[in-house]
Image (cartoon, coloured by chain):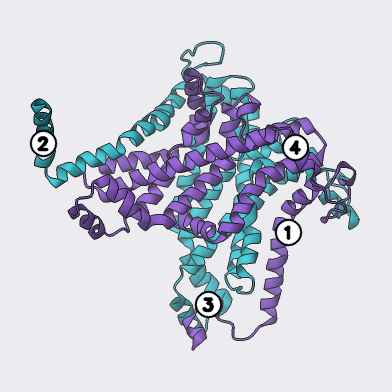
Chain colours: A purple, B cyan
Amino acid sequence: MKAAASPPGLVMPHIRPGRILAWTLLFIGGVIMVTPLLFMLSTSLKDASQVYDLRVIPEAPTLDNYIEILGDGRFTRWLINSTIVAVIVTLSNVFFDSLVGYTLAKFRFRGRYIVFIAILSTLMIPTEMLVLPWYLMASQFGWIDSYWGIMFPGMMTAFGTFLMKQFFEGVPDDFLEAARIDGLNEFTIWWKIAMPLVTPALSALAIFTFLGNWTAFFWPLIVTTSAELYTLPVGLSSFAVEQSIQWEKIMTGASIATLPTLIIFLFLQRYIVRGVMLAGLKG
Amino acid sequence: MSAVSHREAASGGLWSRMSLGQKQVIWAWSFLAVPLVFYVVIRFWPTFQAFYLSATDWTITKPAAFVGLENYWRLFEDPLFWQVFRNTFMYLILGTPISLLISFVVAYYLDRVRFMHSFIRALYFLPFLTTAAAMAWVWRWFYQPVPIGVINDVLSSFGIPQQPFLRSTSQALPAVLAPAVWAGLGFQIIIFLAGLRAIPVTYYEAARIDGLSEGAILRRITLPLLKPTLVFLVVFSSIGFLRIFDQVYNINTNDPGGPLNSTKPLVLMIYQTAFSSYEMGYAAAQTVVLFVILLVISLVQLRLMRDR
């Protein structure tokens, strides 16, 4: 009875050898997947004399690399830059993408369809094609080497707008009508009534925007020229070049760039996985 | 004072005399005002500008002059472009099928696993959260010769000869591709899992009652019903591989795209043309070619997948 009511994955009449084999192979594959991360972390905990010892567990783990690298101030600066950029761009997308998505989903006005198609059409244009005009714009207005210069291309995205529109379409009009009768203005209705109803989509959008900007390399590489304004990926790249073959230093830098997102994942795993599913299926 | 209150009354009167529909229109356009300015200035205008720049000889030092299609003729006669074109498609042709095959197999079996399900899923998903620029350095270290490189170390312990990896023109491209495939698997697995869960259980039950084998269920039910998911992932990951840059740039910083341009993708060529040679007009023409390639590939894939 119980088996019939559950999805096929849950049907487990008896443990078959095939099942155990599949589980074991999946597990081994999973361990192989995280091996590069384990090696990166373990090497970051070794001193220069242990680097050629390829054991995963360091014999004499030390935080010296971290102390040295964070102590010279550059990585701290790049961490702050990346955080500022990723947080502001994320907030901007959460605000504007959902405002536009809501307007396109819930208002009836002439030109609505044209606006929607126009925004959607920008999805076809690859970033790389816009980079040269953006660079020209940034140099004309003095945005090179500024936070705004790094951030302005991503302040709103068609992907986020489309995602939010899909979700706002599922919000019942009755809710909004009731608020209108209560005399709330349209901005308050959107912010106080509609937004709380689409929090799963908002968290999906926030996760994608944050991750995308945290790991972004191409545009920050172009628009920043002084080390003061580098984001973490660009800073790490320049740092690694100058370290040449000091792999324990490079692995420490790579760990500093990677650990924040991994740690966030450990705390928010359920939301992140659900967010990826939502964005992938609706986006 | 009376004038002020009079004006307030008039404007309030205008607003209150409007129908609900008219008010809605005003609200809608005021919500859209800032975003529309953004899309026009940061998206549409630069798009037209990119096409225009591709028809100029703009460099950093001299003002742009109109040269028509000259940049495109130059590009099509440039042997480097055809090498880069071939590389870019190698990333696509190897990367998309390999990553989709691996992620589907993992998702298919992971979907049936209950014991430690979310832990195993997390192992596959973690690389997706990493920074490509950082991971390129980790893989670069892996590919070093002994005694530094982990992969060659493992190979030599099995008595397999040393491999040159990034130093070889034939092995470098797959070696650069590996971290890109690796980092993308987690996303594809999650999307496949969501697609598999969306298939109604009743279909499987009916198939089992009809006595279909597991293989037949996979071929006749799972795969056809998974088609929308598959179309999305094929198009999404193809675009990703055609635009590969971060990994290639970082895995060989002495000679990005080397050895002998054997790993150089189109985006790296664009970057070097624009920001090493400062030939902005020529680079703009390359971005237009990239746009056309992405558009054609997406349309062809959507058409092919819809027909089948």
x then y, percent, for residue B17: 9, 40
List the residue tagged with mark 2: B14
Q: Please identify the residue farthest to the front as the structure is shown.
A: B1
x then y, percent, for residue A152: 47, 32
User: Which label sits in the foreground, 1 or 4?
Assistant: 4
Which amino acid does the dot numbered 4 rest on? Ile
Which amino acid does the dot numbered 3 rest on? Pro
Q: Would residue A110 be seen by someone viewing this image from the given angle?
A: no
Which amino acid does the dot numbered 1 rest on? Ile
Who is closer to the viewer here, B13 or A278? B13
> Residue at 81% of width from left, 51% of height from top?
B151
Whole-angstrom CA distance, mark 3 to mark 2, is 62 Å
User: Which label sits in the foreground, 4 or 3?
Assistant: 4
Tell if the residue under mark 3 belongs to the same chain as the one under mark 2: no
List the residue tagged with mark 4: A69
> Residue at 20% of width from left, 44% of height from top?
B24
Tell if the residue under mark 1 belongs to the same chain as the one under mark 2: no
List the residue tagged with mark 3: A8
Whole-angstrom CA distance, mark 2 to mark 4, is 64 Å
Q: In this view, does B41 lie to the left or right of A241?
A: left
Classify mark 3: helix, strand or loop: helix
Q: How crowded is mark 1: few (under 14 residues within 10 Å), some or many (20 or more)?
A: some
Classify mark 1: helix, strand or loop: helix
Which of disc 3 and disc 4 is earlier in sequence? Answer: 3
